[in-house]
Image: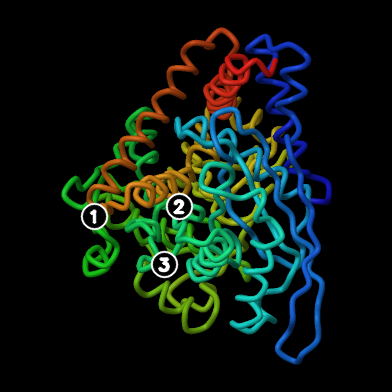
Amino acid sequence: MTGKYSTFKNIQKQIDKCAKILGLDGATLALLKEPIRTLIVNMPVKMDDGTVRIFTGFRVQYNDALGPTKGGIRWHPDENLDAIKALAALMTWKCALLNLPYGGGKGGVICDPKKLSASEKERLARAYVRALAGFLGPLKDIPAPDVYTDPQVMTWMMDEFSVITGYNVPEVITGKLLVAGGSKGREDATARGGMFVLREAARFLELGLMVDESRLYMPPHVLSNIPDASPGDDVVNVAIQGYGNAGSLAHFLATRLFKNVRVVAVSDSKGGIFNEDGLPYSRVSRVKAETGSVVNYESSMKISSEEVLELPVDILIPAALENQITGKNASRIKAKLVLELANGPTTPEADDILHSKGIFVVPDFLANAGGVTVSYFEWVQNLSRYYWDYEEVYRRLDAKMTRAFWEVVEALKEFKDKNIDPRTAAYVVAVRRVVEAMKARGWV
């Protein structure tokens, strides 16, 4: 993000575009383009060898006009403030678009989790909460897991906040272990929400995607006993760039929730594979787990991760890194529908090119909003101390994602004379809600 393409600058460009469409004044625009609070902390952590290391952490609370800020915590050796600001901004629009009572936030720590022991991770998690305890809280700022953090890390953080507070506060953190107040359905929420939006987008575009209604709300452990789809003549081909949690689960769910999906290409950081007859999830995922990369799956042709993007498929799912579809390669994208499970995979220049080609892009802060939506459900369950089963979580998620998609479609129709693309339409829906709240509260 610190190179040629800055995701935060890309987001600011989108806000500028949105401001012109909505006729926003200068003060409102200025408040939307920068975070309300940016916190930087330095945390001493005792290591297993007895030495003390100082870790730098961030927390950005971007905008809280709609409610307490919400967003994940990333642990990465290359973490930086530009990335955190960008993701906090995206969380703001994501929560507004899904009509969640949250503002957007994001946090991070500069560290290499692969070089930390479990006990060092626990001490770092607790140090982060101690450093930020005055700024966190179930009605202030509610963190969640992100890159290289997980339910165990969130549970340690929740416990540390509870120790500081003097009583159990499960609602201060989401994405926790189930036994500590986590929600069923959280493990595949991002990909599952993406599939619900994919179904609606395919209906809108008349792509002929056939849904297996009986499987839509089945939990992962039940779906894992069902084989991949066996598409007939009306096959819908899919390519997935990225095979982390979101990408691999998209492969898993797409071939089980839909009757005629064939995933013909996938990739990870080491390259991609292609097979026009389809890539079975069970075998590809096993090779990935056993060898560390999908490229070792033998019944396929090796291609580059960039080539995965340019295949003549019906649906493309970027689920890897930001800035993958740019002004340089956008003209070579052939998919009819792009579902952005990754954050910021498409640059503004690429958006213009894809829109001119008639390619429908479901933007990241809609496509991957399932995670924060189920985090919201977890928070609601924690507050009430009443917990839902898988089917209820998935039905509520489906309703939220479906409504948000069609609100974007309505915005496309509302501003048809301006020929806006789906991302801009999603921004219009989200920004308008935030601006209405800011004005109602007397901020601007």
> Quick check: 358 above or below 308?
above
C-alpha distance separating marks 3 and 2? 13 Å
Disc on the earlier residue, 3 or 2 = 2
Q: Is residue 23 left or right of residue 295?
A: right
Quadrant position of residue 423:
top right
Per the image, the residue denoted by label 3 is 177
Per the image, the residue denoted by label 1 is 389
Q: In this view, does 390 lie to the left or right of 281?
A: left
Q: Is residue 211 left or right of residue 94?
A: left
Residue furthest to the bottom in view is: 49
Return the residue nearer the eye: 94 or 28: 28
Point 49% across, 17% down: residue: 411
Disc on the earlier residue, 1 or 3 = 3
Point 67% across, 81% down: residue: 116
> Type of residue at label 3?
Leu
> Type of residue at label 2?
Glu
Q: Position of residue 379 (x, y in %)?
A: 42, 48
Per the image, the residue denoted by label 2 is 171
Q: Where is residue 161 in the image (x, y as percent from the top left)?
A: 56, 61
- Contact between marks 1 and 3 (CB within 8 A): the answer is no
Disc on the earlier residue, 2 or 1 = 2
Return the residue nearer the eye: 257 or 71: 71
The quadrant of the picture occupied by the C terminus is: top right
Q: Residues within 10 Å of mark 2 (few under 14, many from 20)?
A: many
